[in-house]
Image (tube, helix red, strand yellow):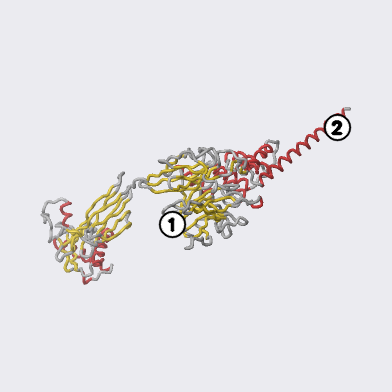
Amino acid sequence: MKRKFLSLLFSASMLSATLYAQEQKGTREKAEIMYKKYEYAKAVVLYEKLAARKDPYLVDLQNLADSYLKMKRYEEAEKWYLEVIKDEKRTDSDLLAYARVLKLRGKYREAKSAFNAYEVASGSSPRVDRAGCDSALKWIASPTIHILKNENTLNSSLADYSPIFVKDSVYFIAEPRESSSDKYGWTGNSYSRIFSAPQKKGSFPSPSAISAMFNKGNFHIGPLCTNKTGTTLYVTKTHSGTEASLQKQASEKFHARVLEIFIYTKDDSGSWKETPFKYNNPKAWSVGHPALSPDENTLYFISDMPGGIGGTDVWYCIKSSDGSWSAPQNCGKNINTEGNELFPTVKADGTLFFSSDRHMGMGGLDIFSSKGSGNQWSEPQNLKYPINSSADDFAFIEVNNETGSTGYLSSNRIGGKGADDIYSFSYTAPVKFVLAVKGTINNKRYKRPVADAGIALFSQNKEIAAKKSSNGKGEFYFELHKDSEYVLKARKAGFLPDSISFNTNGIKLSDTLEYSLNLDPLEKGRTIRLDNIFYDLGKDAIRSDAALILNGLELLMRENPKLKIELSSHTDSRGKDAYNLSLSQRRAQSAVNYLISRGIAKERMVAKGYGETRLINKCGNNASCSDEEHQRNRRTEFTILSN
């Protein structure tokens, strides 16, 4: 009896286990079907049940985490990827996905550690992702001065994005507020449509869907662009073909089905005509996200057509004289990467804005700007924080004004009202801090400006700028840096040079310093003292400090090739007269010999020692004078013999 009871108990247990396994298998099969059809909203419900079981399969956890990631529900994605990486059978791809989810959540330090773990496990370097974490931390610590505002009247708890402005109205893309039986399996929400709202003094009354003609379609509609007059619309529509047209794409914003562009033109009677874009090819590739150049003769769009660089690239066509569009051309490697470039827009000055998930960014899609046209573009610049965030930031438009700029962007960042929200921004250009020096170069003797003199600015013994004094008035101008030491040097052939030292230490406000430099004309018979030429006691050898002064005289003689001089040396009255005369002659000759060694012709110089015969004060023999008074008599001079 006991044996029979145990046998029955065992059979019941086996039956229960079999039914449990069959139930699990049925749920898993349904979940896999939903997952493979990109119906993630339904898949997560089933995978959540499988994940709640004891010892769930790794593949169920992987698909659950990935589904939440595709749905942009990053908090849930992080939770389940954490469970995935705890499994010893996890893959290197799981580690990379977990690191990227942490980055999308703005957990940059944790993300860096996760990227490092991925590199150790895989041997592959996630260089761009990791560098993006470092940049994000730096940009958040020093944000730009853009002020963002959530446009609550346009946004709902669902997705609202990609605004454009035509006259006094805004058009944007949104998931309808009213529930619909047609649901997008990816998110579980209704398919997006084009909405509009009048713009009144910067505010927007309640939006409503625009004409059914533009919103006609079974699946997603938008984004779109228009010409300046609003008489031509370029609208993105998801192809309404069969399930066989499904294509796997890397970005949710670039939908699973193939995209097409339709062009709507308004005639004089007010009727609209729909024309498919010439390069739609729903059996082979997608085209969408149109944007017009300021002259409306170049149409930019995104596509995964053959010949691209990555997943989705920015392409362009040029309008011909007959109104047709040329063959698509890729915007090139400065814009496009191996990842996805999306949502191009073009500013009035021709600046291209676009979003990318592979240019170094803060998380998901980051907004970048580049200048150029066609396939010639500058290196893209990340618009940094707060324009960009750890989530997806896209559909950027900007208009300059007198004080800076205003504009709009779309984002699913933390703190929004719904999934994707529309944000406005304002930017007030900071008052530029300008430090400068200006002045004039004058003739010292005749008190008038010296035109076309050379003026150079030096800092730390290096020339950092040089120019000629301008407009016949001897004027000059240089911009400066804070807390720096400077020297201005002016010179011109026929004149002695002049210089002045100054600094900008402690200056906190914009300012323009003003100085005058005076050039002394070189005229026959004039005697000029060369300061700071010193000799060792009783010696005539040229010291290194004296050589620097003589190098200046060398330059003066090179600038004035007809200049001839007498180079003289003088002593004080102390010591014997004959000795002083001999010593001064030797010193004068040493100075001349030095200049000859530097390439100055000896015929242009005469060495003359005057000893103590030309004292410039009362300190003669036996006079009671201080060392400073005697020092004035110890000097080297040159007298102009001809010029």
- Badge 2 marks a residue whose secondary structure is helix
* In front of the other: 463 or 58: 58
Q: In the picture shown, does residue 340 fall above or below 15?
A: below
Residue with the most extreme front position: 269
* In front of the other: 641 or 378: 378
- Badge 1 marks a residue whose secondary structure is loop
Q: Residues within 10 Å of mark 1 (few under 14, many from 20)?
A: few
Q: Is residue 419 left or right of residue 386?
A: right
- Residue 99 image point, x, y percent: 57, 44
Question: CB under 8 Å between callouts 2 and 1?
Answer: no
Residue drawn where x is 51% and y is 41% of the image:
208
Q: Quadrant of the N terminus?
A: top right
- Residue 581 image point, x, y percent: 16, 63
* In front of the other: 244 or 580: 244
**Residue 521, image quadrant:** bottom left
Q: Which residue is mark 2?
A: 7
Residue with the most extreme bottom position: 603
Chain-order first, disc 2 or disc 1: 2
Which residue type carries mark 2?
Answer: Ser
Which residue type carries mark 1?
Answer: Asp
Q: Is residue 612 left or right of residue 374?
A: left
- Residue 558 image point, x, y percent: 25, 67
- Residue 54 appears in the figure: yes
* In front of the other: 473 or 158: 158
Residue drawn where x is 47% and y is 60% of the image:
376
Q: Which residue is mark 1?
A: 295
